[in-house]
Image (tube, rainbow, N blue to C red):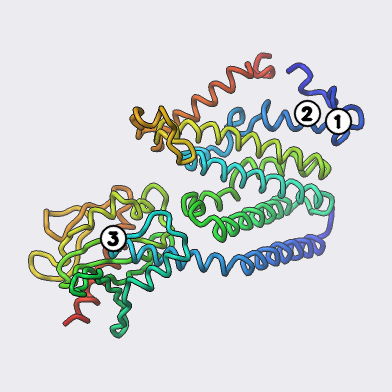
């Protein structure tokens, strides 16, 4: 973790992906600064849709799509966007991508759309998306912004998938709606895991494990 | 710093482009979404009337199944859906009417199935609602809808109407959902309207 803040890394130096900053950005977003497990952002949707693994995966895909798309557009327009209305412009772009995904679900994955309910639309107000547009895409070139969007989207999606996996496994005794031979037969599903408190427990445990592996924040040590 | 005129033009241009993209997406997906909504509605009629549905029936066949099994009868301003199982002397088993009204956040729509004599509720289903998830949104859940099975549609005094919420025990009262009193009141209102309309038409 010592070279985490350097501008170059071994693999993509000096003219690698995005001038050598690609991998660092990827690692920052997906791991070192994971939006869910480290920054604890966007947990409303993370708590609400993780009752089943399938829902978690679709929600993760939605966030990757929106994050990559909005980061790209905000970055492309960063030199033309008047500073005063930059946030309105960001929200307009984010909302467009979110509604696109919502319409797509409603047309081709109706049941999934019904299960996720309002939470797809609520990605518009997800602080991860807005935060990356404001804090990263506004200052960085398009390619690097795509990498950042992908990294943060992945960071969110992976944590969501982990929570969804365990909540479905322990709460329903199934995975992706399929019974597991040798497990479903004797396991008594723990209803608590599907309910809201189960989501808090699962998220808390995941955050604790993430932080235990990552170690203490070097800045907090000072 | 860029001038106000530039800011205005930028905002207008960005707004127009976003609107154009969304219009295109909505137009393109509309036929698919309409099909899905129709299937959802068909499924709800079938569920309310307790018509057996084979497992994993694709959306298109749900509409076909409804057209085959459920008879639509227009009675002035209300439409009733009647299900008569084959071989039961063609006696109708259940009569359903659509109910609709404003919820807390958006329109609530569903079906109310009653016995042919209009004495009790057989089932209710909801196919459209935007109530608060976890509170008012719970009206669609099985545990809530099941409370309405065999509920009398008249009170002890013979007046048509049901009660959702607290009160003395009565054959026409069910418990509401705590935290969703407003949604329950509104559902009660639209159900009662549908019940009254059905009874008036019957006489």
Instruction: Estimate the x, y position of residue A25 in percent, counting from the top left.
Output: 76, 32
Estimate how packed mark 1 is, as few (under 14), some (14 to 19) or many (20 or more) residues with alpha carbons within 10 Å: many
Q: CA distance from mark 2 to mark 1?
A: 8 Å
Residue annotated with mark 1: A20
Find residue A130 and report its image quarter: top right
Residue furthest to the left in view is B157
| A179 sits left or right of A61 in the view | left
Reply above or below: B104 against A42: below
Residues tagged 1 and 3 counted as in contact (Cβ below 8 A): no
Image quadrant where residue B109 sits: bottom left
Which residue does the image show at 46% across and 68% down from the upper left?
A: B38
Q: Position of residue A201 (x, y in %)?
A: 44, 28
Q: At x 24% / y 77%, what residue is drawn?
A: B197
Element on which disc 3 rests: helix
**Circle nearer the viewer, 3 or 2:** 2
- Labelled pair 2, 1 in contact (Cβ < 8 Å): yes
Residue B24 visible? The answer is yes
Q: Which residue is mark 2?
A: A24
CA distance for labels 3 and 2: 55 Å
Quadrant where the C terminus of chain B sits is bottom left
Residue to which mark 3 is pinned: B185
| Chain ID of residue with mark 1 | A
Q: Secondary structure at mark 1?
A: helix
Instruction: Determine the image quadrant of residue B162.
Output: bottom left
- How far apart are the two marked residues, 1 and 3, measured between alpha carbons? 61 Å
Question: Is A165 left, or right, of B111 in this rendering?
Answer: right
């Amino acid at each position: 973790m010592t070279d985490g803040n350097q501008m170059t890394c071994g693999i993509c130096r000096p003219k690698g992906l995005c001038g050598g900053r690609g991998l660092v950005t990827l690692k920052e977003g997906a791991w070192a600064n994971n939006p869910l497990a480290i920054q604890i952002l966007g947990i409303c949707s993370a708590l609400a849709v993780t009752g089943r693994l399938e829902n978690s995966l679709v929600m993760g895909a939605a966030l990757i799509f929106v994050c990559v798309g909005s980061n790209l557009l905000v970055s492309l327009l960063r030199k033309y966007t008047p500073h005063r209305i930059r946030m309105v412009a960001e929200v307009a772009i984010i909302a467009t991508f979110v509604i696109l995904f919502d319409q797509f679900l409603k047309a081709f994955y109706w049941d999934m759309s019904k299960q996720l309910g309002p939470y797809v639309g609520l990605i518009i107000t997800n602080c991860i998306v807005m935060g990356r547009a404001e804090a990263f895409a506004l200052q960085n070139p398009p390619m690097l912004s795509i990498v950042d969007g992908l990294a943060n989207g992945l960071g969110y999606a992976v944590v969501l998938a982990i929570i969804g996996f365990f909540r479905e496994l322990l709460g329903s005794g199934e995975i992706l709606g399929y019974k597991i031979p040798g497990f479903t037969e004797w396991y008594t599903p723990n209803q608590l895991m599907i309910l809201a408190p189960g989501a808090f427990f699962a998220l808390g445990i995941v955050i604790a494990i993430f932080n235990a592996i990552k170690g203490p924040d070097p800045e907090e040590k000072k | 710093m860029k001038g106000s005129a530039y800011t205005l033009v930028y905002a207008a241009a960005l707004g127009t482009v976003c609107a154009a993209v969304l219009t295109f997406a909505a137009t393109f997906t509309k036929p698919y979404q309409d099909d899905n909504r129709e299937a959802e509605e068909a499924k709800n009629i079938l569920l309310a009337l307790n018509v057996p549905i084979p497992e994993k029936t694709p959306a298109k066949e749900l509409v076909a199944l409804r057209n085959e099994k459920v008879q639509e009868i227009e009675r002035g301003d209300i439409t009733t859906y009647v299900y008569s199982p084959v071989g039961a002397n063609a006696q109708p088993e259940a009569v359903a009417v659509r109910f609709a009204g404003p919820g807390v956040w958006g329109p609530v729509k569903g079906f109310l199935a009653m016995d042919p004599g209009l004495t009790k509720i057989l089932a209710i289903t909801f196919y459209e609602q935007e109530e608060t998830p976890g509170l008012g949104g719970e009206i669609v859940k099985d545990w809530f809808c099941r409370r309405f099975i065999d509920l009398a549609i008249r009170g002890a005094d013979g007046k048509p109407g049901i009660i959702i919420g607290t009160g003395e025990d009565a054959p026409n009262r069910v418990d509401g959902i705590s935290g969703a009193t407003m949604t329950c009141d509104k559902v009660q209102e639209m159900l009662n309207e549908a019940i009254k309309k059905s009874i008036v038409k019957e006489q």
